[in-house]
Amino acid sequence: MRLDKLLSNMGYGSRKEMKKWLKSGSVTVDGKPVKDGKHQVNPEKQTVSVNGEEVHYREFIYLMMNKPQGVISATEDGMHETVIDLIDPEYHLFEPFPVGRLDKDTEGFLLLTNDGGLSHDLLSPKKHVAKTYFARINGTVTEDDIKAFKEGVTLDDGYKTKPGELVILSAGETSEIELTITEGKFHQVKRMFQAVGKEVTFLKRRSMGPLELDQNLDPGEYRELTVEELTQLKNRSSK
Ligand code: URA
């Protein structure tokens, strides 16, 4: 790729600013100053440095966030804080976006990336990527609900859901459950419980595909995926 493109992708400034850097001789490729922005480099094989500092090139970033309540899963919102506002500016140059949405009052696993292909695969209805949610429910969740979810329930707009796997963790005036679904309709978990006459009072996503939310992440915290996690995710999304 072109040297000036590589550097501007990495946040070293615009093409124009890049020219200045290059002209001053502070950009080197394999130790030799290069002044021409059009110079072709292979970032996987060659070492590019600016002012003696090595540029670690990569095209994509993948962040696992524990989304807190009260924050919008979008890149921009005129009124409210978004998940992008929670991310260090050093990542902004990659222009990450959330893969799918969690409601403002839902917390838990949210993947942020600038890899449009992977995002598309993970969200594709054809890929049936499983998402597991923990929820607190106002009311007693029963075996009948397990059966109903297994068969699919009809939502308020007449849509019949695909089978969901419901596990009751505790049942009583307030119940705690885990629900695994392979779709991502608007407010799906809340509306599935609505369909059986119950209300979700707390919702947290625990996993997406092969990846589980890192227990060490407090709400609002995030970290990059490990190489192993990314491999698992890519293998899953290509199926
Ligand atoms: N289902 C919901 O109702 N809300 C979410 O945020 C995610 C799944």
Image (cartoon, rainbow, N blue to C red):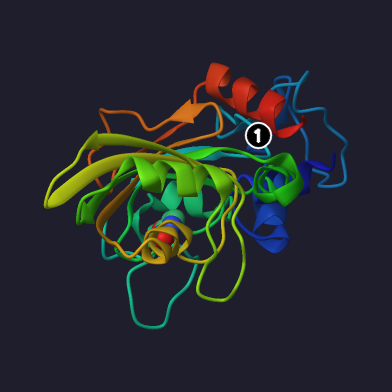
Residue at 75% over, 22% down:
44
Residue plotted at (26% across, 59% down): 69
Q: Residue at the far bottom: name it.
A: 78
Q: Quadrant of residue 102?
A: bottom left
Q: Is residue 104 visible?
A: yes
Mark 1 highlights which residue?
Answer: 58
Q: Say if residue 84 shows up in the picture.
A: no
Answer with left or right where residue 2 lies relative to residue 193.
right
Q: Quadrant of the N terminus?
A: top right
**Taking the image as four quarters, which one is ligand 1 found in?**
bottom left
94 up-or-down from 101: above or below: above
Which amino acid type is marked by label 1? Arg
In percent of the image, x 30 and y 52: which residue is there? 203
Could you tell me which quadrant the C terminus lies in? top right
Residue 101, given in percent of the width and then of the height, sits at 49, 59
What residue occupies the far left of the structure in this picture?
173
